[in-house]
Image (cartoon, rainbow, N blue to C red):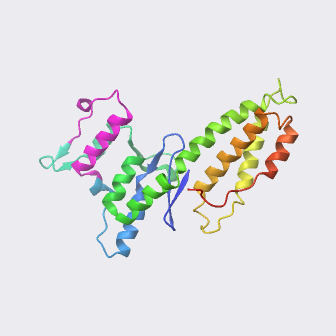
Amino acid sequence: MTIQIGKEFTVKIGHKTEMGKLNDIFTIGNSYREAEGKKLKTMEQFLSLPDTWEFILEAELNENPNRHSDDLKIPTKDSGKKVLYGQAIKNFTVIKSQRGGKPDNRGVWANLHILLKASMYLSAKLEYEVIDVFINQKILFWREVGGENFKEFNSLIDTLPDRKGKENRNLYIEISLEIRKKLSILSTKGYNGKEHHALIQENRAEWLKSLNFAIKVGFIKSYEELKDTFEKLEVIEEMPF
């Protein structure tokens, strides 16, 4: 999942893990610092700070209540002034280093709290934009709602009179592709081509909610009626909040 930050940048967020690429945050933050005539900061500097790891430890304990701080010793050097983050990172689940695999997946990945912590370290402008995209646009909320609605939608297809007792997996895939196709022509008025991801997630969630309701109350009684109804659904062009 790609999230738009500001007008020019994106951050990759894992669908299942909800972890983002910390390298992206530093690329954005340093571009802002450069524009403001400020000295650039490195991810290595950030990850070497004891304060950073106090926060990461808190994130880990909240994410995994069964873990204990005694099991998560953070190695340091220079009389505790610097963290040996390459060693420390191996013991945590809220921050991971990926070296192999596809080039786009390589780098350091961290949960959203840590991404925000890094944004605060880099730039007030970036801090605001990260808060805005995840809180005001509610992008992860809409993604989660859409996912749950799609699960229910698939089960409801199985209840249609002309689909009962049949193998409907291909139909799930067909509708999913139609949703993507329809969303690819999403109006981006007021947005550039990379900024509509929150709207895409919201449209997907609301469309599926409407289709699920129509099947439940009997407005849609066949797969053909389902497809006809889907074609009539309209794209939401503006955020309602």
Q: Is residue 230 above or below residue 60?
A: below
Q: Nearer the viewer, residue 24 or 121?
A: 121
Q: What residue is shown at x 34% (from left), y 26% (from top)?
A: 66
Residue 24 visible in image: no
Q: Foreground residue, 6 or 218?
A: 218
Above or below, 24 against 56 in this view is below
User: In the current view of this chain or complex, which residue is farthest to the left?
Assistant: 79
Numbered range of the magenta stretch: 47-75
- The main secondary structure of the magenta stretch is helix
In the displayed structure image, the side of residue 238 where residue 71 appears, left or right? left
Residue 29 is one of the magenta-drawn residues: no
Residue drawn at x 31%, y 43% is 56
**Quadrant hosting residue 63:** top left
Numbered marks: total = 0
Residue at the location (38% across, 47% down)?
Answer: 113
Residue 48 lies within the magenta run: yes
Q: Position of residue 126 (x, y in %)?
A: 40, 63
Percent from the top left, x then y, of residue 28?
A: 42, 64
Task: Name the residue at the top extreme.
Answer: 165
Is 209 positioned to the left or the right of 23 in the image?
A: right
Q: Which percent across, then down, holds residue 172?
A: 75, 37
**Image quadrant where residue 197 sits:** bottom right
Please identify the quadrant where the C terminus is shown: bottom right
* Residue 239 relative to residue 172: left or right: left
Whether residue 3 can be seen here: yes
28 or 159: nearer the eye? 159
Q: Is residue 194 above or below residue 200?
A: below
Residue 42: image location, x then y, percent: 31, 60
